[in-house]
Amino acid sequence: MHRPYIICHMITSIDGKVTGTFLSSDTVAKAADHYFKIHRDFQADGFACGRITMEDSFTGGWYPDLSEFEGQKLEREDYIADYNADFYAVAFDRHGSLGWKDSRIHDEDPGYDQAHIVEVLCEDVSDAYLAYLRSIGVSYLFAGKEEIDLSEALYKLWSRCGIRRLLLEGGSILNGAFQRADLIDELSLVQVPVLGEKEDKLLFDNNLKGEFQLIKAEVLENGVWLRYHSNSYEAKPKLKLSLVQGS
């Protein structure tokens, strides 16, 4: 099946945590500059996050008033609002819970700013939410009736959006779902010299046993950049990432 090459790109603590107060420390702030530069240098076609990560990073918990869209009926057909987008923000938002105000990401970092938003939804999403997304030009794809079918979602991202290289950037639940489905080709981890707390989330939620091969280790300011390729039989061959320093 055709699908994008998936690179899970994350900042982690020494003990593998990806959420928590440690992320706001000065130590992590310096390493984060490298993380965002690496994100840009990969020159991927898009990045993907789960609902919670998108909410924390971009929508801030806002949700629109859908009352004016109540009563509308829409077929469960994929909707691509911008076929010419250069970069995509892929939101795995099973039941349509994210409150976007327009069709693009607005961020200080040029690696995220102006990315065209694509919602990956289940078919049980409300008609009013779909009508709202159409009204602001947000694209959406269906992948599953009540639960996300990752394989179907990735095929549609490949075939309908032209995404060939996708950065998977959390959170723990979405990362874990990709890992259990054997859909991660490469790990790109900026590891910082701090420890998380016991309640912080790990890189993969509820992961299965797996093996990766170390292909790069680079010392950064206040951290180290580790790249691994999956040893899974299903993993795609490594792409040439010549624009990433040291590739």
Image (spheres, rainbow, N blue to C red):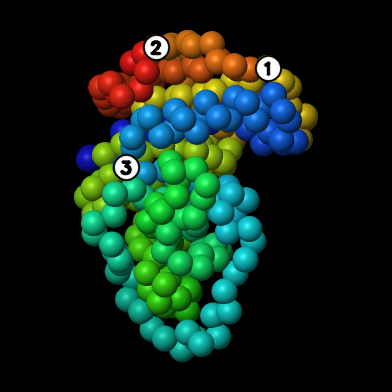
Residue, disc 3: 45
Q: Marks 3 and 2: which is nearer the front?
A: 3
Q: Secondary structure at mark 2?
A: strand
Residue, disc 2: 215
**Which residue corresponds to the image point at 34% horizontal and 48% vertical from the top-left?**
87
Residue 52 seen by the camera: no
Circle 2 packing at 10 Å, graded few (<14), some (14-19), many (20+), is few
Residue 245 seen by the camera: yes
Asked if 193 appears above or below 164 in the picture, the reply is above
**Which residue corresponds to the image point at 44% horizontal and 43% vertical from the top-left?**
110
**Which residue corresponds to the image point at 51% horizontal and 65% vertical from the top-left?**
100
Mark identifier at residue 193: 1
Indicate the quadrant where residue 76 lies: bottom left
Question: Residue 158 location in percent, x, y?
Answer: 26, 46
Asked if 6 appears above or below 97 in the picture, the reply is above
Q: Which kind of residue does numbered mark 2 sit on?
A: Ile
Label 1 and label 3: CA atoms lie apart by 30 Å
- Among numbered discs 1 and 3, the one appearing first in the sequence: 3
- Locate the N terminus and report the quarter of the image it occupies: top left
- Locate the C terminus and report the quarter of the image it occupies: top left
Label 1 and label 2: CA atoms lie apart by 21 Å
